[in-house]
Structure formats: structure tokens, C-alpha cells
Amino acid sequence: MVTLTEVEYRDKVHGGWLGKLIGSAVGAPLGGQRQTREVEDYPEALARVPVPAQDGTDFQLAWLRALQTVGPKIGPDDLIAAWLRHLAHSHAEFAYARANFHKDVRPPVSGIFDNPFRDMLGALARAELWGMVAPGDPERAASYARQDAMLDHAGPGVEGAVLLAAMSSAAFVESDPGRLIEVALSLLPEEAKVARAVRDVARWHGEHAHWARTREMLLRAYASEDVRDSTISAGLIALSLLHGQGDFGNSLVAAARCGWTSGVTCGAIGAVAGIVLGAGGIPANWREAARDELTAGWGVVGLPRTTRTAILAEHTCDVGRLVVRSQSAGRVQLTEEPPEESSELAIPETPAVLRHLAIGPYVASYRRGPLEVHIDYDGRPSIGYDVPRHLTIGIANAATRGLDLQTRISCPAGFVVTTSSGTVTLPESGLVSFTVTISAPQEHAQIAVVNPCTLFLSLEDGSEFTVPIALVGEALWYAAGPYGDFEEAHAPEQPGILAGDMPLGAEGWQGLSVAEPAVNLLADLESEQGTHYLATDLFLPRERRARLRVACNDGTKVWLNGQQVFFQHEHRPVSPLSADEFEVALREGWNRLVVKMAQCSARRFLAAALRDLQGHLLLEALNSFPRPA
């Protein structure tokens, strides 16, 4: 049992917020630097400047408001509602997750589907809050963090958030950096990429005891082209905590020296160390140098622009007390008097969060009355013409008696549904699963961006429940090639093809049904080295200006309605960073987009996404159905 006094809890939460702001101010000037840098006289250099706005703290403000409104049983739908109400962020993973929400794709699928930034650190950057509202209960904090992170991340993007939330929660009881890391690792699968990286960092640090050498080995073993990579960031957090040996300033300076996402890593270290020490224990030279005020970013809507850390701590503790009473009962208690015995963290042998992490990101789960329903999308929540989609539906009985129910599935007009179930008998605590096949014959159906299907469940007592089945329309693209020299014009560059006067389904073009065009248009295309052409027809209900994002590891030339709008030819890594974005003018009706691509190596990578001028994905641009002849 973990016992914290009310005074201790408030002081440690205040320390967590204050440490987060101090760390963010320390790391922000060095963020994005790939080289190490010496850091001197940092407390004095802060000079009480305002802490720059951070995506992580913006989300924490929205989550804190959601917790105040909904309470400790907050769920993914509550977080999505708070996101859409209070956050207008339109870059990286945030833009792609928001687009998935509008396509009726819910977590955990929303975090991985058509999201090239799924492995990044956006969720890690906001994870400390879950530790502060679940003090001394790392499993509860990790569960909250997983639920949060799967909105817009998958894999390492979720694992990093779980790790930091668990460390933040454990910091209310433990102070040794090695023990904090050990507790957090117990809540990640052993094979998880973030867990492997952190274990390696701990081993290398023990062997070499030099932060720069350990950093070099981390970057070499877990190479990433993106400084926002969650695995690298988690490794640098562990390294800096171990190197600092519990010293607040030394830990922050170590993270700042490491560069990369130092605004996030220093903020995380400041939060964890601040919880350990409490606000009163943060060294005076650091506390007095930093401005004690959180400033919200431009993307925050309907929330205070500035808030002092004491106020944040008060709101956090109000929510945390409810969490302790309802979600951590039996493991944590808050008292007025100090406990007679020291507290010990209770980590179960098989934490529930490990089971949830093992389920995978393509299984969406819902609770409907006494039923737990799982929709397994088998790798993608999308559908193309004439290619059947096979889904597995699992239904578990959480009632204390057997249940009889009827199942039915509805889909848009023209879609064909085949299922192996109709009437289901579920014994107490029983589980049944069945397969559903959904297809869209091109002669009968028209695929849209969103193709809502619904699972209807009817119990014998008259109760009825519905569960959404999201099927995103796959994009229709056409590929031609390979041809010769990229600098030469080839057959697909005929004016009629480039301008849209000639159909794309003619001889020499291969049709592609692309599930994730923003991740990789070529995922299902076997191709040889050479010059390739990718083309699609986009329909818009009105003319508008937009920004086209094209990512490629080699050369690209782009035409829109017969006019060249972009050209570059250079070799790049296969990474979300290998992207160019430029403004285009789209006309009302049909628009022909043609991309010429150089594939100079065995690796092939091409992705494309249209965004409005505010950065949100342009969902009204449709290319899921063919252009009329």
C-alpha cells in the first residue's frame, strides 16, 4: 500500500508542474540539434523568460479540463471530444489523427492508420499528467497513458508515453533513477522497442559511465531520421536520469547536452525530478530563475491562456483524489497524518496494461451494456472495389448470467455483407467470435471517404446496442513504369494524360487501391528501379487552394491538371521527413494529379496528402471512385 499525506501530494504535484516548465525552458533553445553541446550556467541563462508553448502542455491542459468534466473513468471518446473542442493543432501526427476521427476511425486504429508520424513523441510529451493524477499507482498511470497515446500513435509512440507516465507515478514513492526505470519497464512488453532501448541505455551507462558514449551507442543502435522519434527520446530520458543520479540540475543539463528533442526530454526529466523532490525541494537557483507560469499555445481554444503552476497543481490534485478513491483503492491512500511505515509500490505480476498492449493497434474495443465487443480489422480499416474485407468480431459476456442475442450488420447501399453469425448464445463469462466479409462491387457500390457500417446487437430482454464499423475508402491510383532516365520525358507525359483528357485505365497503367496514401503509395506495388509514374483523379465540390505534401526518398516531379507544380531530384532517407509541401490551386470538379518518381535504389517510398491552408487534411478531395469516361 502506498500512503501519501495530502501536503506531500500537493507539494509533489506542484513540483512536477514546476519541474516540467523549468525543463521545457532549459531544453527548448537546443531542440532539434543532432550534435552534443556543452551547457553552462543554465539557471542564470533562463532569466525568468516565459516558457515557450509546447504541444505536450497544450494537450495536458485539455486533458485536465476533460478529467474535471468527466471524472476518473474518462475514456477515449471523452478525450477525442476534448481534443476537437479545445485543440486546433494541425501538424504531424495531430493532423492525421484528427482526420481519422472525422472518418469515424476510433482508437487504437486512429493512431496507426494512414499516419506517417505514428512512432513520434507527441504522446510522450504529455504523459506526465497521468502519473500526477495516479500517484503511486504506475499501472493506473500507464493505463491512462496508453488510452491517451493510442489516439494518435502506435508502437513506440504509445510505449514511450506508457514509460514516462509510469515513471512519473512511481516518483511519488521512489527516488532512485534506476528504480524508477525498473518499475516503468515492468509495464512494457519485454520485446517492445522502447523497452529494449531503455534496457540497453541502462546497460551501456553501467559499462561506460559516460553520457556521450552511451548517447552515441543509442543513436547507432536505434537510428532514426526524425529527431521526434519516441524510442530515441525515451532512451535519452533514461540516460539523463541515470547520469544525473538524482541531482535536478545535472539531470536537466545532461538532457540539454544530448540535443534532439531536448524541449520534450528536459521537460519530462524536470517533471519526474520535480515530483521526487516536491516544489520545496527544487534547488532555489533553478526555481527562482524560471518564470512560474504556463502559457498555452496558439492551438488551444476555450482554455485560459496563462496559468500559474500552483493553480495547475490544485486542479490536478482535485482530480487525483478522485482517481485514488475510485481507481487506485486498495493500492494508494491519501491521509492527513504521515504513515507509520514506508510505502511500497504494488505492481501485479501480469499488469492489465501489458495485456492491452499485446492486443495490437488494429483491434477496436467497445463496452455495450453487459457486452464487450472487439472489432479486428486485420491490418487496415479500409475497403476498395471488388476486394473482400474480412473482419473478426469478438463478443464477451460480462454479465453474471447467460445471454442470447441477435447480431446484424448494415452497410452502405451496394455493399455486400456475409457473416457466419446471426443468433449467438453466450454463457456467463463466455466469449464468441465470428467472421464478417464486406465487399464493394464496383458495378453496384460507390466507395466514399467514410463508409459507415454498423453492428446491431439485440438481447432477449429487448435491449439493443450498436457498434460502429469504420471502413475508409481506399484511394484509386494508377502506376506506369519502370521507364529509363528520370530527366527524360516518357510516354505518360503526353499532354492528354497530364491534363486529364485521357483515361488512366488505358494500356500500360496498373490500377492500385491504396489504403494509406499518406504513409506509402507503393506498399503493395512490386517495382523495379527506374522512373515510375503515379496518377490519380481528385474530385472537389468547389475550387480551393490547398497544400500538397509529397514524400519521396528520390526524385519527384508533379503535375496538376497539366501544369508542372513541383520538381526535386535528390536522394533522401525513407522517412516522414523526406517530404516537400507546396501550395496548389484545385478547381471545382475533377483534377488530374500525376507524380513522376525516380526509384534509384531497392528501397521505394512515395506518399502524398492534401491539406488545407490551416494544415488539416483535406477530406473533401475524393479519389475513391473512378472518373467518368
Image (cartoon, helix red, strand yellow):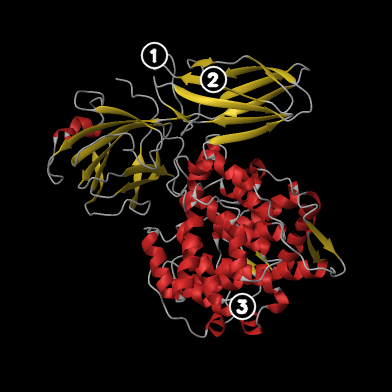
Vertical placement of 279 versus 44: above or below?
above
Q: Quadrant of residue 608?
A: top left
- Mark nearer the N terminus (2 vs 3): 3
The alpha-carbon separation of the residues under discs 2 and 3 comes to 57 Å
Disc 2 element? loop
Disc 1 element? loop
**What number of labels is visible?**
3
Could you tell whether 273 is left or right of 239 in the image?
A: right
Residue found at the far right of this picture: 337
Could you tell whether 302 is left or right of 552 in the image?
A: right
Question: Which of these two is toward me, 613 or 445?
Answer: 445
Query: Which residue is under mark 2?
Result: 411
The alpha-carbon separation of the residues under discs 1 and 2 comes to 16 Å
Name the amino acid, label 2.
Answer: Cys
Q: Cβ–Cβ below 8 Å for labels 1 and 2?
A: no
Q: Cβ–Cβ below 8 Å for labels 2 and 3?
A: no
Residue 23 circle label: none
- Mark nearer the N terminus (1 vs 2): 2
Question: Which of these two is toward me, 225 or 209?
Answer: 209
Residue at position x 66%, y 74% from top?
292
Residue 561 placement (x, y as % from top left): 27, 36
Image quadrant for the C terminus?
top left
Residue 584 placement (x, y as % from top left): 34, 45
- Mark nearer the N terminus (1 vs 3): 3
Q: Quadrant of residue 407?
A: top right
Residue 290 circle label: 3
Residue 580 placement (x, y as % from top left): 33, 52
Query: Which residue is under mark 1?
Result: 443
Could you tell whether 59 is left or right of 380 in the image?
A: right
